[in-house]
Image: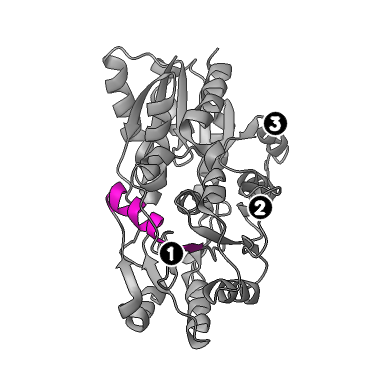
Amino acid sequence: MNVLALEPWYGGSHRRFLDGLARHSGHDFRLATMSNRYWKWRMQGGAVTLAAKAREIADEGFVPDVIFASSMVNLPAFLALTRDLFAGTPVVLYFHENQLTYPLREDEARDFTYAYINYLSALAADRVVFNSAFHRDEFFEALPELLRRFPDYTHLRTAQRLRDKSRVLHLGLDLDALDAHAGRKRAGDPLIVLWNQRWEHDKNPEAFFRTMNRLDDAGCQFRLILAGERFEVQPPAFETAFRRYADRIIHYGYAEDIAEYAGLLHRADLVVSTARHEFFGVAMMEAIRCGCHPLLPRRLTYPELIPDQLHRPLLHAPILYETDDDLFEIMRRILTGQERPLPESVLAEIPEPFAWPIHVHAYDTLLESVGQ
């Protein structure tokens, strides 16, 4: 089958996901993409550019059986602009995130224009896919509240219709690329704590550094790797931490190269999430694959991703924590040697179901069911 993929935010996890899917799928993918800048403009006007790119692809003789669109696509606009080409072509809409529930900064008000674009796009799609059950459930809890904001013709009944044509497919991960740059962890040195998430407010770095400061004040020894994607405006907590821990920071900033990034992950011992919100958790899964013992809140997507039946040997630390105090105490016990991180062999198995060579079959089956 031929699949035309639309991605107006072709960067970061969106790019890695789409490249991995196209590379591993048994179907023939062609990509119409735009750079990952100006996200509001991508949702508002990106459809015009994507429609032009899709026409160029069609002019080359590529006739799609299915269109696979990111949730940042204004799908009704795209379909209107290409109705002479794709009027009968089924569409899968994939939600990486959504603008109904994406967390805002404290001084920011939600612009429901973008939430409504998500809603209209879901209506226009033949199949709607979410990257986690947490994401799906949160979206459908928020959707009636969005629709009730309007004075009449709210179409509340469409929420159930959308849910009926929705399903969950977790992201695929390129674990082979991480495995290719494996290295040995150093024994005997202070343990290395990793931050590899985006440097943004929804990942709640303030809570992470509060915990690290408490551990430092308690006399715990550790070193830090502060990686993850950075943006022009970033939380000030990172600069404050740099001043305090400069002599203990092994790496500070985004690792552009996969070899460098994987090397940092393989070098670290612990990875911590204090996120307020997480639609899936790629960064955590990547770190776990590289042998980092994760410490994750018992909420969001994490209970969904960490197997309940995970065997934890005696005197090895837990993974999920309840409160900030709980996180501090678990880390204190690990850093002082009272509990040990889980063995790397146990950790490496956790993300295995999401490996592209295994997971891609679910995507191919979905595309075939829609395209036939």
Question: SS class of the residue under badge 1?
Answer: strand
**N-terminal label among 2 and 3:** 3
Q: Amino acid at mark 1?
A: Leu
Q: Residue furthest front?
A: 188
Question: SS class of the residue under badge 3?
Answer: helix
Specify whether residue 143 is in view: yes
Question: SS class of the residue under badge 2?
Answer: helix
In-front residue for pair 339/68 = 339
Q: Disc 3 designates what residue?
A: 164
Rendering quarter of residue 319? bottom right
**N-terminal label among 1 and 3:** 3
Residue at point 73% right, 37% down?
157
Dot in front, 1 or 3: 1
C-alpha span from label 2 to label 3: 24 Å
Residue 303: give its label: 2
Specify whether residue 174 is in view: no
What crowding class fits label 2: few (fewer than 14 Cα within 10 Å), some (14-19), or many (20 or more)?
some
In-front residue for pair 112/243 = 243
Q: Amino acid at mark 3?
A: Asp
